[in-house]
Image (spheres, rainbow, N blue to C red):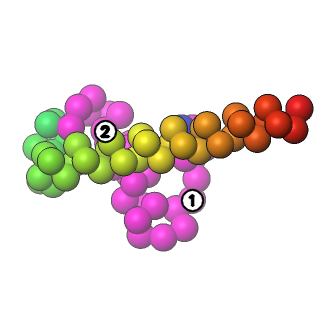
């Protein structure tokens, strides 16, 4: 799910932000460094990363539950 998300073509501005924020987060390793680098407030970065992770977990769980039901 993570690889698909990072390789996907964003469909709107929000997805573009999420994909790129997550890529930068992976590069920099933590929200504080990313906040310093982007000048986005730390709490915003931390909250947005948490929401993106939660979204990816939901997608992963939905995908896995679908596979379990359909063989």
Badge 2 vs badge 1, beta-carbon distance below 8 Å: no
Secondary element at tag 2: helix
Q: Quadrant of the C terminus?
A: top right
Which residue extends farthest front? 69
How far across and how far down the image is residue 43, in percent?
15, 47
Residue position for label 2: 25
Magenta region includes residue 26: yes
How far across and how far down the image is residue 33, in percent?
16, 36
Residue at 33 percent across and 42 percent down: it is 50
Which residue extends farthest bottom? 12
Residue 34 is marked as none
Residue position for label 1: 9
Secondary element at tag 1: loop
Q: Could you tell me how many numbered marks the image carries?
A: 2
Secondary structure, magenta segment, majority class: helix
How far across and how far down the image is residue 28, in percent?
26, 33
Q: Earlier in the sequence, mark 2 or mark 1?
A: 1
Vertical arrangement, residue 62 with respect to residue 44, above or below: above
Q: CA distance from mark 2 to mark 1?
A: 18 Å
The local crowd at label 1, few if under 14, some if 14 to 19, many if 20 or more residues have their Cα within 10 Å, is few
Residue at 58 percent across and 53 percent down: it is 8
In the picture, measured across the screen, residue 19 lies left or right of residue 24, that is: right
| Quarter of the figure with residue 34 | top left
Return the residue nearer the eye: 68 or 36: 68
How far across and how far down the image is residue 37, in percent?
15, 45
In this picture, which residue range is highlighted in magenta? 3-31
């Amino acid at each position: 799910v993570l690889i698909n998300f990072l390789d996907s073509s964003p469909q709107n501005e929000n997805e573009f932000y999420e994909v790129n924020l997550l890529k930068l987060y992976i590069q920099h390793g933590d929200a504080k460094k990313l906040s310093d680098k982007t000048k986005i407030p730390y709490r915003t970065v931390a909250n947005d990363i948490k929401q993106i992770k939660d979204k990816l977990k939901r997608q992963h769980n939905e995908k896995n539950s679908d596979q379990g039901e359909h063989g």
